[in-house]
Image (tube, coloured by chain):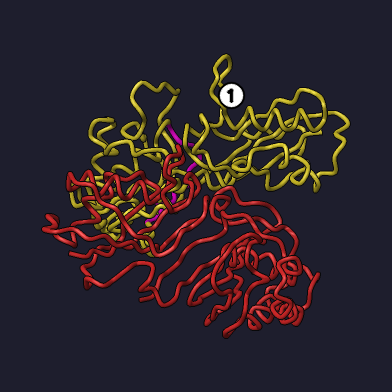
Chain colours: A red, B yellow
Amino acid sequence: MNIKLTVAYDGTNYYGFQEQRGTQYVTIQELLEKALSKLVKQRIQVIGAGRTDSGVHARGQVVNFKFDHWPVPLNKIPLAVNPLLPEDVVVLLAEGVSDDFHARFSAVKKTYVYTINNGKLPDPFLRRFTIHEPRLLDDKAMNDAAKYLLGEHDFKSFQAQGATVKTTVREITEADVERKGENIYISLTANGFLYNMVRIITGTLINVGLGKNTPEDVKAIIAGKDRTIAGPTVPPQGLCMERVYY
Amino acid sequence: MNIKLTVAYDGTNYYGFQEQRGTQYVTIQELLEKALSKLVKQRIQVIGAGRTDSGVHARGQVVNFKFDHWPVPLNKIPLAVNPLLPEDVVVLLAEGVSDDFHARFSAVKKTYVYTINNGKLPDPFLRRFTIHEPRLLDDKAMNDAAKYLLGEHDFKSFQAQGATVKTTVREITEADVERKGENIYISLTANGFLYNMVRIITGTLINVGLGKNTPEDVKAIIAGKDRTIAGPTVPPQGLCMERVYY
């Protein structure tokens, strides 16, 4: 049986999603594998849709694993597994999927949301899930800038230096900047993301929000294919893997 | 000069508001006194409106302190003090008040809010600020029950055993139970609260929400003046000191 789990976590205390073999760092993958293995008294390894970095959160991370003669009814899995996980990691949903389903390779697109707390003073209740930017950001200009990201582009300017991938071309199908109260939400949906891409895009959009760049500059930043002309990589705590589409 | 500060904090990591002399436990009072003393290079002691317990939060705790020739403009105090505080404690506002203002004794009423996450599954993003009750609570019945609390009563049934005060009579002027999405908010405003009163009232209202008690039972629980007939004391993390009125 091939089982798909949807998982939410507060990543503050963890060293990202992916298991770090031979280290003492605790990762989400490791916690899930331990809990599932304990449940069925047999070693289980899971495949994750994406490797969230240290301190990054998820509301809709997806993992899958195969297991013959799985003993727990699917709808009971969350209730059975959650007590074996720390409070900041929660299995939301378990579904049976076809044998060829692969959490990572079957994904067609993903949505990430980055949250900026744009209040004058920091909010102690949001500090784990936002970055605080006390200077008033022009969210309209940021949203205009985000629209230049839409479509298929070479996003090399928005990839952390040193990363190696076959191609840096990706297609972004949603790029919205929205203010609700004191928070600004940057939502990006794409068929794939380069390493640190959402955090570098956010840093670039913040520069637009501060008036350091115009929305049109983003067009030139994409065209330049040069990491040094994009904005800074913002910290991980504002980032959340919102949803994976199959 | 007599200065009034409004303070918000995530109390998860602290041993309540009040300084615990001669212990290693870190309290909010101690953090505020250290930060203010560092700012003006002189020992400052603050008076708090109320002693929140270990793990309890505040959006509107109030403190005051007196200081001759205070060197920092009042509107700059939050920006000057916050960098000297940990991220989970934030000074929101500083105001000059009359010499006879006392954060505790001048308070005429206070509002506390207790938040219950009533979703089927726990939410890792809310776990520090709510308790999770997966059984569906009847919030309408809880609200009906809360109305019996309104007015001046002897609230002895809702005081932690062993506490000693001159009188257990208090006046509750607001008692509302409201569901928003998966959360249920219990808001209580009174001229004073007994030790653990909000947490015991919440435990009692949860019993009503589960159908273990009827709303009318609350009337009898008040009249009984007996801690053992009220509901359990719920954990601290759902509790927040919302506002102090002067």
Name the amino acid type tagged 1. Glu
Q: Give whichever of A205, B225 is nearer the camera.
A: A205
**Residue A11 place in picture, x, y as percent:** 47, 51
Q: Quadrant of residue A172?
A: bottom right
**Residue A207 place in picture, x, y as percent:** 75, 68
Q: Is residue A48 magenta?
A: no
Residue A136, placed above or below residue B58: below
Element on which disc 1 rests? loop
User: Is B82 positioned to the left or the right of A114 in the image?
Assistant: right
- What kind of secondary structure does the magenta stretch mostly adopt? strand
**Residue B133 place in picture, x, y as percent:** 29, 50
**Residue B97 place in picture, x, y as percent:** 76, 40
The residue depicted at 76 percent of the width and 79 percent of the height is A217
The residue depicted at 63 percent of the width and 83 percent of the height is A147
Question: In this figure, what is the number of numbered marks?
Answer: 1
Q: Give whichever of B140, B19 is nearer the camera.
A: B19
Quarter of the image for the N terminus of chain B: give it. top right
Q: Is residue B189 magenta?
A: yes
The answer to whether one can see residue B180 in this image is no
Quarter of the image for the C terminus of chain B: give it. top right
Residue density around tag 1, few if under 14, some if 14–19, many if 20 or more, within 10 Å: some
The residue depicted at 25 percent of the width and 63 percent of the height is A94
Which stretch appears magenta?
B184-194
The chain letter for the residue carrying disc 1 is: B
The residue depicted at 57 percent of the width and 14 percent of the height is B22
Residue highlighted by disc 1:
B19
Q: Give whichever of A60, B186 is nearer the camera.
A: A60
The answer to whether one can see residue B11 in this image is yes
User: Is A64 positioned to the left or the right of A177 in the image?
Assistant: left
Q: Residue furthest bottom?
A: A151
User: Is A174 positioned to the left or the right of B230 in the image?
Assistant: right
